[in-house]
Image (tube, rainbow, N blue to C red):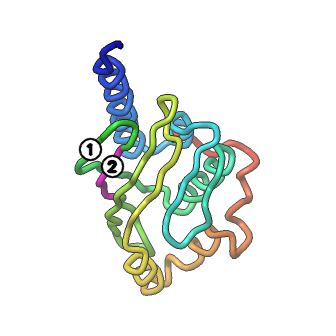
Amino acid sequence: MGNPAPNQERLAAVVEGVAREFMEAWAHPNLDRFMALLHEDVLLLQPVTKPVRGKAAARREFGRMMQWLPDLHGTVDHWSARGPDLLIAWRLDFTLGHAPFTLHIVDRIVVRDGLIGEREAYFDSLRFMLATIARPGAWLGYLRYRGYLPGGDARLGSPLPKE
Protein backbone atom coordinates (compact mmCIF):
# COMPACT_ATOMS: atom_id res chain seq x y z
CA MET A 1 0.00 0.00 0.00
CA GLY A 2 1.09 3.55 -0.76
CA ASN A 3 1.79 6.19 1.80
CA PRO A 4 -1.28 8.45 2.27
CA ALA A 5 0.91 11.36 3.44
CA PRO A 6 1.42 12.90 -0.05
CA ASN A 7 -2.37 12.94 -0.65
CA GLN A 8 -2.96 14.52 2.76
CA GLU A 9 -0.25 17.10 2.10
CA ARG A 10 -1.79 17.92 -1.29
CA LEU A 11 -5.24 18.29 0.28
CA ALA A 12 -3.81 20.50 3.06
CA ALA A 13 -2.19 22.75 0.43
CA VAL A 14 -5.45 23.02 -1.53
CA VAL A 15 -7.48 23.85 1.61
CA GLU A 16 -4.86 26.42 2.67
CA GLY A 17 -5.15 27.98 -0.79
CA VAL A 18 -8.93 28.27 -0.37
CA ALA A 19 -8.40 29.92 3.05
CA ARG A 20 -5.98 32.45 1.50
CA GLU A 21 -8.35 33.20 -1.38
CA PHE A 22 -11.22 33.64 1.11
CA MET A 23 -9.10 36.17 3.06
CA GLU A 24 -8.26 38.11 -0.08
CA ALA A 25 -11.82 38.01 -1.43
CA TRP A 26 -13.29 39.48 1.74
CA ALA A 27 -10.47 42.00 2.26
CA HIS A 28 -11.27 43.49 -1.17
CA PRO A 29 -14.83 42.35 -2.02
CA ASN A 30 -15.61 41.80 -5.67
CA LEU A 31 -18.48 39.70 -6.97
CA ASP A 32 -16.42 37.83 -9.56
CA ARG A 33 -13.76 37.05 -6.96
CA PHE A 34 -16.40 35.50 -4.68
CA MET A 35 -17.80 33.44 -7.53
CA ALA A 36 -14.36 32.10 -8.42
CA LEU A 37 -14.19 30.52 -4.94
CA LEU A 38 -17.47 28.60 -5.23
CA HIS A 39 -18.20 25.13 -6.55
CA GLU A 40 -20.93 25.06 -9.20
CA ASP A 41 -23.37 23.34 -6.83
CA VAL A 42 -22.32 25.20 -3.68
CA LEU A 43 -24.58 25.19 -0.61
CA LEU A 44 -24.51 28.34 1.54
CA LEU A 45 -26.19 28.29 4.96
CA GLN A 46 -26.56 31.04 7.55
CA PRO A 47 -28.93 32.10 10.30
CA VAL A 48 -32.32 33.65 9.47
CA THR A 49 -32.18 33.03 5.71
CA LYS A 50 -33.11 30.24 3.36
CA PRO A 51 -30.30 28.01 2.09
CA VAL A 52 -28.63 29.29 -1.08
CA ARG A 53 -28.01 26.47 -3.56
CA GLY A 54 -25.86 26.76 -6.66
CA LYS A 55 -23.50 29.36 -8.04
CA ALA A 56 -26.22 31.37 -9.84
CA ALA A 57 -28.21 31.78 -6.61
CA ALA A 58 -24.99 32.66 -4.75
CA ARG A 59 -24.25 35.39 -7.34
CA ARG A 60 -27.70 36.88 -6.74
CA GLU A 61 -27.30 36.73 -2.95
CA PHE A 62 -23.80 38.27 -2.91
CA GLY A 63 -24.90 40.84 -5.50
CA ARG A 64 -27.84 41.97 -3.36
CA MET A 65 -25.65 42.09 -0.27
CA MET A 66 -23.02 44.20 -2.05
CA GLN A 67 -25.72 46.58 -3.32
CA TRP A 68 -27.04 47.03 0.21
CA LEU A 69 -23.64 47.26 1.95
CA PRO A 70 -21.23 48.68 -0.64
CA ASP A 71 -18.46 49.34 1.91
CA LEU A 72 -18.41 45.85 3.42
CA HIS A 73 -15.08 44.14 3.89
CA GLY A 74 -13.84 41.29 6.01
CA THR A 75 -10.82 40.50 8.13
CA VAL A 76 -9.85 36.93 8.95
CA ASP A 77 -8.66 36.53 12.53
CA HIS A 78 -7.92 32.78 12.55
CA TRP A 79 -8.44 29.71 10.45
CA SER A 80 -7.88 26.02 10.94
CA ALA A 81 -8.25 22.99 8.71
CA ARG A 82 -8.54 19.25 9.03
CA GLY A 83 -8.87 17.32 5.82
CA PRO A 84 -11.34 19.12 3.53
CA ASP A 85 -12.96 20.93 6.49
CA LEU A 86 -12.01 24.53 7.12
CA LEU A 87 -13.03 26.80 10.01
CA ILE A 88 -12.56 30.53 9.59
CA ALA A 89 -13.10 33.06 12.39
CA TRP A 90 -13.47 36.51 10.90
CA ARG A 91 -15.08 39.94 11.13
CA LEU A 92 -17.30 41.59 8.54
CA ASP A 93 -17.26 45.40 8.81
CA PHE A 94 -19.78 47.67 7.09
CA THR A 95 -21.96 50.72 7.56
CA LEU A 96 -25.37 49.86 8.96
CA GLY A 97 -27.83 52.75 9.08
CA HIS A 98 -25.12 55.44 8.84
CA ALA A 99 -22.94 53.96 11.60
CA PRO A 100 -20.15 51.36 11.59
CA PHE A 101 -21.01 47.79 12.50
CA THR A 102 -18.89 44.69 12.98
CA LEU A 103 -20.34 41.21 12.61
CA HIS A 104 -18.21 38.43 14.11
CA ILE A 105 -18.59 35.22 12.09
CA VAL A 106 -17.29 31.66 12.12
CA ASP A 107 -17.62 29.86 8.81
CA ARG A 108 -17.52 26.09 8.51
CA ILE A 109 -16.42 25.33 4.97
CA VAL A 110 -16.13 22.03 3.14
CA VAL A 111 -13.64 22.21 0.28
CA ARG A 112 -14.52 20.14 -2.77
CA ASP A 113 -12.48 20.04 -5.97
CA GLY A 114 -10.41 22.97 -4.70
CA LEU A 115 -13.48 25.19 -4.21
CA ILE A 116 -16.01 25.97 -1.52
CA GLY A 117 -18.58 23.19 -1.78
CA GLU A 118 -20.48 24.09 1.37
CA ARG A 119 -20.35 26.98 3.82
CA GLU A 120 -22.30 27.37 7.02
CA ALA A 121 -21.96 30.72 8.76
CA TYR A 122 -22.40 31.09 12.50
CA PHE A 123 -23.01 34.56 13.94
CA ASP A 124 -25.15 36.35 16.49
CA SER A 125 -28.19 36.97 14.31
CA LEU A 126 -30.13 38.50 17.23
CA ARG A 127 -27.45 41.17 17.77
CA PHE A 128 -27.43 41.90 14.03
CA MET A 129 -31.25 42.15 13.82
CA LEU A 130 -31.49 44.34 16.93
CA ALA A 131 -28.85 46.69 15.49
CA THR A 132 -30.73 46.81 12.18
CA ILE A 133 -34.02 47.58 13.96
CA ALA A 134 -32.36 50.26 16.12
CA ARG A 135 -31.02 52.05 13.02
CA PRO A 136 -33.94 53.28 10.92
CA GLY A 137 -31.53 54.31 8.16
CA ALA A 138 -30.86 50.60 7.57
CA TRP A 139 -34.48 49.50 7.23
CA LEU A 140 -35.16 50.27 3.58
CA GLY A 141 -31.90 48.73 2.38
CA TYR A 142 -32.36 45.61 4.48
CA LEU A 143 -35.92 45.10 3.25
CA ARG A 144 -34.76 45.47 -0.36
CA TYR A 145 -31.82 43.13 0.24
CA ARG A 146 -34.10 40.43 1.68
CA GLY A 147 -36.54 40.89 -1.23
CA TYR A 148 -39.43 42.28 0.82
CA LEU A 149 -39.46 45.49 -1.23
CA PRO A 150 -38.84 46.10 -4.91
CA GLY A 151 -35.42 47.28 -5.94
CA GLY A 152 -33.18 44.64 -4.44
CA ASP A 153 -33.30 42.49 -7.54
CA ALA A 154 -33.43 45.26 -10.14
CA ARG A 155 -29.94 44.80 -11.54
CA LEU A 156 -29.39 41.13 -10.82
CA GLY A 157 -29.97 40.08 -14.42
CA SER A 158 -27.00 42.17 -15.49
CA PRO A 159 -23.53 42.15 -13.98
CA LEU A 160 -23.11 44.30 -10.89
CA PRO A 161 -20.37 46.93 -10.86
CA LYS A 162 -16.86 45.63 -10.24
CA GLU A 163 -14.05 47.31 -8.36
What type of secondary structure mainly makes up the magenta span? Answer: strand
| Coordinates of residue 69 in the picture (x, y in percent) | 49, 61
**Quadrant of residue 100 within the rendered picture:** bottom left
Q: Quadrant of residue 121?
A: bottom left
Residue at x-position 33% and y-position 35%: 20
Mark pair 2, 1: CA separation: 5 Å
Residue 24's disc is: none
Q: Which residues are magenta?
A: 86-91
Q: Nearer the viewer, residue 58 or 92?
A: 58
Q: Is residue 162 above or below residue 2?
A: below
Above or below 25: residue 145: below
Q: Position of residue 46 (x, y in %)?
A: 50, 63
Depth check, front residue: 54 or 65? 54
Q: Are marks 2 and 1 in contact (CB under 8 Å)?
A: yes
Identify the residue shown where x is 32% and y is 20%: 4
Tag 1 residue: 80
Which residue is denoted by mark 2 in the rendering? Answer: 87
